[in-house]
Amino acid sequence: MEHPQITFIGAGNMASSIIGGLVESGQPADRIHAADPFPQSLERLREIAPVNTYDDNTAAVTGADVVILAVKPQVMADVCTGIAEAAQASGALVISIAAGITIASMRRWLGERTAIVRCMPNTPALLGCGATGLYANEQVSQQQRDFADTILGAVGIVRWVEREADLDAVTALSGSGPAYFFLFMESMIDAGVAQGLDRDTATELALQTGLGAARMALENDVDLVELRRRVTSPGGTTQAAVESFEARGLRQQVTDAMAAAAARAETMAKEMG
Ligand SMILES: NC(=O)C1=CN([C@@H]2O[C@H](COP(=O)(O)OP(=O)(O)OC[C@H]3O[C@@H](n4cnc5c(N)ncnc54)[C@H](O)[C@@H]3O)[C@@H](O)[C@H]2O)C=CC1
Ligand SMILES: O=C(O)[C@@H]1CCC=N1
């Protein structure tokens, strides 16, 4: 099967970015379906591509090869129980992008034999620059794995993990990660302003530095330590800054912050299961 019938339940930010990427990568819009109770969400989606839209989840799921659950975790139980019968009848692969909803919970709501891929994308998917971790349960066939790979691969890189628990680490790293870089850039801008730069100049320099550093790390065959060494003249300004970061425990702060994120993902799974 070249192009599966793909249904999105929830037509918000993440769904629209994935749909945009899919259409751009050659998935025909008439084989994409999306359901959302809010007409504005569906209208925004139709501005991206002429996909089929529904105000009824069950109608959208009927006949689907792949169902992507792109709703908030809080409504996941209701959404899953509502579509369970139609998803079973279609033998669809169900892909969830919701944070903290386990496969065990989804199997309970959708039926024990449902093929499920649980994944964690991130917001740069909006620009086709996302990073997604995925995990498949035993019911998922190779063809269904390929579907999931292609769908999430339309908006960035994809990495499969061997254990579902690894998705908590993925959430802590790349799911929440964009916010860490935003926070770091916010801090750099504030510090630049405190040293006398105007805010626009500080902002432009900080953002371009973030972009340049990420591109150097991605596009060079050189590891991060070496790239850092090349900026750091002995006894110079960078060394002074890096020693200040190290002395104040930047690495430990990152370790602690990511542990807090992963622990929260685990707690959310218990609260919402
Ligand atoms: N924002 C982020 O960084 C990331 C978010 N996610 C996950 O993506 C999922 C979606 O997030 P967003 O797209 O940012 O949210 P959003 O709020 O933009 O979209 C959710 C959509 O679901 C619709 N909806 C609500 N109840 C519904 C129902 N009963 N049936 C069908 N549709 C319904 C809403 O009208 C809305 O359009 C969430 O589960 C979130 O955890 C995953 C990775 C990263
Ligand atoms: O903050 C959250 O809970 C979600 C999951 C990863 C990014 N946003």
Image (tube, helix red, strand yellow):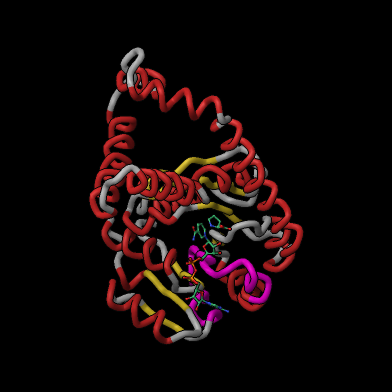
Instruction: Tell me the quarter of the image containing the C terminus.
Output: bottom right
Image: 205 above or below 45: above
Residue 258 vs residue 24, the one in the foreground? 258
Q: Nearer the viewer, residue 264 or 147?
A: 264
Image check: 255 left or right of 216? right
Residue 162 screen position, x and y as percent: 61, 38
Q: Quadrant of residue 87?
A: bottom right
The residue at the far top in this view is: 234
Q: Quadrant of the N terminus?
A: bottom left
Residue ID at (36%, 24%): 238
Does residue 134 show up magenta in the picture?
no
Picture residue at 29% right of the left edge, 39% below the top: 209
Q: How many marks?
A: 0
Give the image location of residue 128, x and y in percent: 33, 53
Residue 56 screen position, x and y as percent: 52, 85
Relative height, residue 42 to residue 1 (above, below): below
Q: What stretch is highlighted in magenta?
A: 57-78
Instruction: Tell me if 145 is positioned left or right of 157 in this view.
Output: right
- Name the residue at 37% across, 78% down: 52
User: Does residue 64 show up magenta in the picture?
Assistant: yes
Q: Position of residue 96 (x, y in %)?
A: 56, 60
Quadrant of residue 258 within the rendered picture:
top right
Quadrant of res 164: top right
